[in-house]
């Protein structure tokens, strides 16, 4: 989360000679990151990123504390002018019992909702606009000024990092506040006038009449809100179950500032100072009078925790020498109390302040505090010593061949795409596949990306479709995992290589053959086969050593139509791991023959009963001296073959070769 | 007519008819070669009268020199002429060869892999569809942690595993940490894991699928200086010598201490200001590249490694983001990477 505070506001707590830009630079290096700084009038606004573990710094006071620890490291003066946690306590609240004539009945139905509950009634408030100072500061921090009462609540939150709420006391039926979990579908209208239907299990407060007066930690109810007629108020400071607050806030979409504080888990101890400081402000700016006793329900009091660590361990972990007194100064400035143990001059016993209890628990947490204030920029850079680690040979081969394949396909003019692993139900059905073969996301952002792919083909069809008209020739490939559902186990993550072109079957087949040649896979066959996705007569399978590793063909007209594509699409999909396994690093070598090669051409008209494959097979089977056959020209079905004859023992004559070729025709 | 004169006439005639460089070369062989006409005539000198022998020899020598010069001259003229007459418009475009493209993420991944392999890291690959245990529990993110809710993680509709919890799409490559520790069994570990990762987000800087690369080092006596040194090495290799890095305190459950890493902005040179105006690309001169930290002792323990004996560091960055942060790349919209628009793809 980000918060905004102003420089002048910070100076209320902090005595320093550092300029706003120095504060930005130094705090960003060692503490909360001040992402931006903006001069406004005679003040500066800091925009600060707060990490979720350090919610104590999401306040003017929290930043002042950080500054006190950090700035001295850069030779800057920095001291707290006062500590609000010790200045504002319950003891400071005027507890004249004669005036406490107003009462509240409080019931908390479930003990995991609220770790500390405090409330006090204040009377005879005068509602008006805020003082210029408060108004201006809030507005600089992007908080709209409403009236003096609401503004004080917000002012407290930014000052100390503890959200508060204020009810109109007279609107609470029977002055009863019952805190409990909401039921599913219960409704509440919040301060901003929105009706919220609750998911159930949310922390709410009802009054005697049964109406919900507060969606706790998120926003108060409209029915108990402050209006111009308000005379008496309930000032309300709590810490809630953070998991519940986050859940309610996320599900209802009510991402209020208060919620972003409460969902991080706040310090129960700070409730006291916030309430005391709040009462002081309400008295000062709204003439409020205390008119009830102080309600404080705090069943499980905070107990201080300690961590012990040696300076040696700190130095070993950071990798630099830091002397003991420096470590003690750093930790003390951050609010830790440090005791150097008697028997050893290197052991430290560190007591953790209440507002750091969630975040500092073990030795490594202490190391972080020391290291960051010491300054990461002061830590040298080293490379760790080299070490031999065994790599999975299969993985290694896979990455190498994947790279080889990608580069080859790029160089012969294909474009690589990377698609989402998830596709839509429509995409699955438009290729005639069964939806239940696919793993389904239970919380998908949209229907378009709801199912995990078992083939890359749908994505590639979509790629062609969406690029139609942008370029005439489209040739795409993708290498990615598919996810084959298994029973009671993680899916089989199977790498596929898919190619889609809008050119011709010959182009597609040529791409595959070039790839197989590049990978030195020579013992393959491409045979006709009927495959559901492809046109009956333009469909084939690729066999390597008689194992089928993939299919190629022309997308069936039915699917082309369903996917609303204009151009014909030729698609190949191969099991990429099989290619990797069949890969040969060195191609086969034949000694160069010293004998003459006779080349003879032959024209053949191809037909169903006289296919290319049949001619070639027959030639190799029945002709002597045949070394190679190439298709050198093709016009419609008229093919020109070139036959290469040679003997590995002697020079043969042209007559001998011609005689052989005659056997074919 | 004597033989010499005849030969001279014959040569004149043949030279006049020699229209190619090859035929001129042939003339050279047929007249001046070892078995050429000149030598044949010369052999006749034996039968020539004694007193004529001298002048015969002289004449044939003159003819030989003449032929040699003529051939040389004709060859020279011919070569000159050919070069002058020949014309190809060299401003014409060359023959077109197909130009394909690799996806920018692939380009980034390849470069990143090389950079880390150079210092002894091994690239690995682990499941993208994972159990909660590997994505969260083993990384010190217990139940109830915000990252585990359905707003941050994509879950699969599948029966829960008693031991490992729900099935999900890995929200980070860190899910591979526990698997790598168990594969290696005993440190040292020098891992680079690059994979697809998923989160239910979509805007200009978030896509529901993206990539991450994760570095993990575990060994004896690993400290913060090693983490800093490695990241600095990577930044300088990938972004360029003039780019700087800084580590800022951050918070992750699986590392302690945790850092966020910034690289100085290549557009404004780390100044935060371009032509007197605030740089639009960065935050006050710095660009966030990702998170890192020292491996949390709990994470080591879950991987079966004794945190008292060993320590380590880890980082996780996005290759797409790194690619976009290179000086020369101007795109800032991550969605472009996964829209598969040919007009975007063909540029890489």
Image: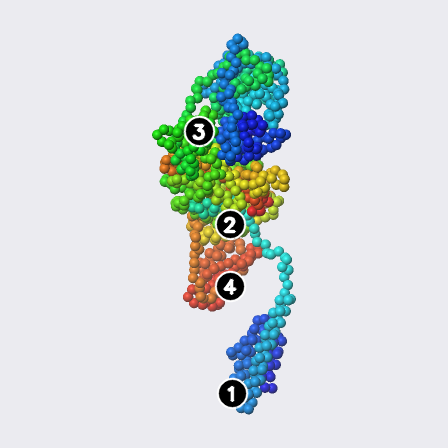
Q: Tell which tag, 1 or 4, sits nearer the viewer.
A: 1
> Where is residue A44 drawn, in percent x and y?
59, 30
Q: Is residue B30 left or right of residue A487?
A: right
Label pair 1/2, CB-CB below 8 angstroms: no
Near mark 4 (Cα within 10 A), the count class, few <14, some 14-19 or many ≥20, is: some
Quarter holding the N terminus of chain B? bottom right
Q: CA distance from mark 1 to mark 4?
A: 54 Å
SS at badge 3: loop
Q: Residue drawn 46% across and 31% down? A: A330
Q: Which mark is residue B46?
A: 1
Q: Hey, which quadrant is residue B313 in on the image?
A: top left
Q: Front-most of B211 and B285? A: B285
> Where is residue B278 drawn, in percent x and y?
61, 38
Q: Residue drawn 50% across and 30% down? A: A68
Label pair 2/3, CB-CB below 8 angstroms: no
Q: Tell which tag, 2 or 4, sits nearer the viewer.
A: 2
Disc 3: host chain:
A
The answer to whether tags 2 and 4 share a subunit is yes
SS at badge 4: strand
SS at badge 1: helix
Which residue carries the number 2 mark? A407
Q: Which mark is residue B283?
A: none
Q: Tell which tag, 3 or 4, sits nearer the viewer.
A: 3
Which residue carries the number 3 mark? A360
Label 2 vs 4, first from the N-terminus: 2
> Where is residue B234 drawn, in percent x and y?
49, 44
- Relative to A157, residue A454 above or below: below
The answer to whether tags 1 and 2 share a subunit is no
Q: Residue drawn 57% across and 16% down? A: A283
SS at badge 2: helix
Which residue carries the number 4 mark? A600
């Amino acid at each position: 989360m980000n918060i905004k505070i102003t420089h002048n506001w910070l100076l209320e707590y902090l005595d320093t000679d550092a300029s706003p830009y120095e504060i930005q630079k130094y705090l960003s290096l060692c503490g909360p990151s001040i992402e931006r700084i903006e001069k406004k009038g005679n003040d500066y606004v800091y925009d600060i990123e707060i990490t979720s573990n350090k919610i104590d710094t999401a306040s003017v006071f929290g930043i002042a504390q950080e500054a006190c620890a950090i700035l001295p490291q850069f030779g800057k003066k920095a001291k707290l002018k006062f500590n609000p946690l010790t200045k504002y306590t319950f003891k400071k609240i005027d507890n004249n019992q004669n005036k406490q004539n107003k009462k509240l009945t409080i019931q908390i139905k479930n003990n995991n909702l609220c770790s500390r509950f405090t409330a006090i009634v204040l009377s005879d408030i005068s509602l008006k606009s805020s003082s210029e100072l408060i108004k201006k500061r809030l507005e600089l921090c992007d908080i709209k000024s409403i009236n003096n009462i609401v503004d004080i609540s917000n002012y407290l939150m930014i000052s100390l990092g503890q959200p508060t709420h204020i009810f109109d006391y007279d609107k609470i039926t029977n002055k009863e506040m019952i805190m409990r979990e909401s039921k599913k579908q219960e409704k509440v209208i919040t301060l901003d006038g929105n009706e919220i239907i609750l998911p159930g299990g949310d922390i709410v407060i009802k009054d005697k009449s049964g109406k919900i007066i507060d969606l706790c930690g998120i926003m108060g109810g409209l029915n108990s809100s402050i209006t111009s007629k308000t005379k008496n108020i309930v000032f309300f400071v709590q810490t809630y179950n953070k998991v519940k607050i986050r859940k309610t806030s996320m599900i209802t979409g009510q991402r209020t500032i208060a919620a972003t504080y409460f969902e991080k888990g706040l310090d129960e101890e700070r409730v006291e100072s916030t309430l005391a400081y709040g009462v002081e402000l309400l008295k000062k700016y709204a003439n409020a009078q205390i008119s009830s006793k102080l309600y404080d329900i705090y069943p499980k009091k905070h107990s201080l925790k300690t961590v012990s660590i040696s300076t040696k361990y700190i130095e070993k972990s950071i990798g630099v020498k830091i002397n003991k007194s420096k470590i003690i100064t750093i930790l003390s400035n951050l609010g830790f109390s440090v005791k150097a143990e008697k028997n050893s001059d290197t052991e430290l016993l560190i007591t953790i302040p209440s507002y750091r209890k969630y975040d500092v628990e073990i030795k490594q947490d202490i190391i972080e505090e020391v290291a960051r204030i010491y300054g990461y920029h002061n830590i040298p850079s080293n490379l760790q010593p080299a070490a031999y680690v065994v790599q999975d040979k299969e993985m290694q081969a896979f990455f190498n061949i994947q790279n080889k394949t990608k580069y080859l396909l790029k160089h012969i003019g294909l474009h690589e795409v990377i698609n989402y692993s998830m596709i839509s139900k429509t995409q699955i059905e438009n290729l005639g596949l069964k939806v239940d073969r696919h793993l389904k996301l239970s919380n998908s952002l949209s229907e378009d990306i709801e199912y995990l792919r078992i083939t890359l083909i749908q994505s590639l069809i979509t790629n062609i479709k969406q690029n139609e008209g942008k370029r005439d020739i489209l040739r795409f490939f993708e290498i990615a995992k598919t996810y084959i559902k298994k029973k009671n186990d993680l899916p089989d993550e199977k790498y596929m290589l898919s190619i889609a072109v809008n050119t011709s079957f010959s182009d597609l087949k040529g791409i595959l053959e070039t790839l197989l040649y590049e990978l030195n896979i020579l013992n393959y066959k491409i045979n006709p086969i009927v495959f559901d996705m492809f046109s009956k007569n333009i469909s084939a399978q690729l066999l390597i050593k008689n194992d089928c590793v993939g299919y190629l063909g022309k997308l069936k007209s039915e699917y082309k139509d369903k996917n609303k594509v204009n151009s014909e699409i030729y698609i190949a999909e191969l099991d990429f791991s099989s290619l990797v396994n069949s890969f040969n690093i060195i191609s086969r070598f034949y000694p160069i023959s010293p004998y003459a090669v006779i080349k003879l051409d032959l024209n053949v008209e191809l037909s169903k009963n006289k296919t290319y494959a049949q001619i070639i097979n027959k030639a190799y089977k029945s002709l002597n001296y045949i070394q190679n056959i190439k298709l050198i020209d093709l016009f419609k079905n008229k093919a020109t073959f070139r036959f290469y004859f040679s003997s590995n023992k002697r020079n043969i004559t042209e007559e001998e070769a011609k005689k052989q070729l005659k056997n074919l025709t | 007519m004597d033989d010499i004169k005849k030969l001279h006439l014959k040569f004149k005639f043949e030279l006049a008819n020699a229209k190619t460089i090859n035929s001129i070369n042939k003339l050279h062989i047929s007249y001046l070669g070892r078995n050429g006409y000149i030598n044949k005539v010369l052999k006749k000198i034996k039968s020539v009268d004694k007193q004529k022998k001298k002048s015969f020899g002289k004449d044939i020598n003159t003819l030989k020199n003449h032929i040699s010069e003529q051939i040389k001259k004709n060859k020279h003229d011919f070569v000159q002429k050919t070069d002058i007459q020949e014309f190809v418009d060299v401003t014409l475009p060359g023959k077109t060869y197909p130009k394909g493209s690799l996806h920018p993420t692939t380009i980034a991944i390849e470069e990143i892999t090389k950079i880390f392999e150079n210092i002894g890291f091994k690239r690995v690959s682990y499941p993208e569809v994972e159990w909660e245990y590997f994505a969260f529990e083993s990384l010190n993110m217990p139940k109830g942690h915000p990252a585990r809710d359905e707003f941050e993680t994509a879950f699969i509709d599948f029966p829960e595993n008693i031991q490992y919890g729900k099935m999900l799409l890995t929200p980070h490559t860190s899910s591979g940490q526990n698997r790598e520790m168990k594969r290696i069994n005993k440190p040292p570990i020098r891992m680079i894991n690059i994979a697809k990762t998923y989160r239910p987000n979509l805007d200009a800087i978030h896509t529901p699928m993206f990539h991450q690369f994760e570095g993990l080092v575990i060994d004896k006596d690993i400290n913060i200086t090693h983490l800093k040194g490695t990241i600095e090495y990577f930044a300088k290799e990938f972004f360029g010598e003039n780019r700087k890095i800084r580590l800022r305190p951050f918070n992750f459950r699986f590392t302690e201490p945790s850092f966020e890493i910034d690289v100085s902005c290549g557009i404004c040179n780390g100044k935060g200001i371009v032509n007197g105006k605030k740089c639009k690309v960065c935050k006050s001169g710095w660009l966030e590249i990702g998170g890192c930290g020292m491996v949390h002792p709990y994470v080591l323990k879950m991987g079966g490694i004794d945190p008292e004996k060993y320590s380590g560091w880890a980082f996780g960055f996005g290759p797409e983001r790194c690619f976009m942060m290179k000086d020369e790349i101007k795109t800032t919209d991550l969605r472009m990477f996964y829209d598969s628009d040919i007009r975007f793809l063909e540029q890489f």
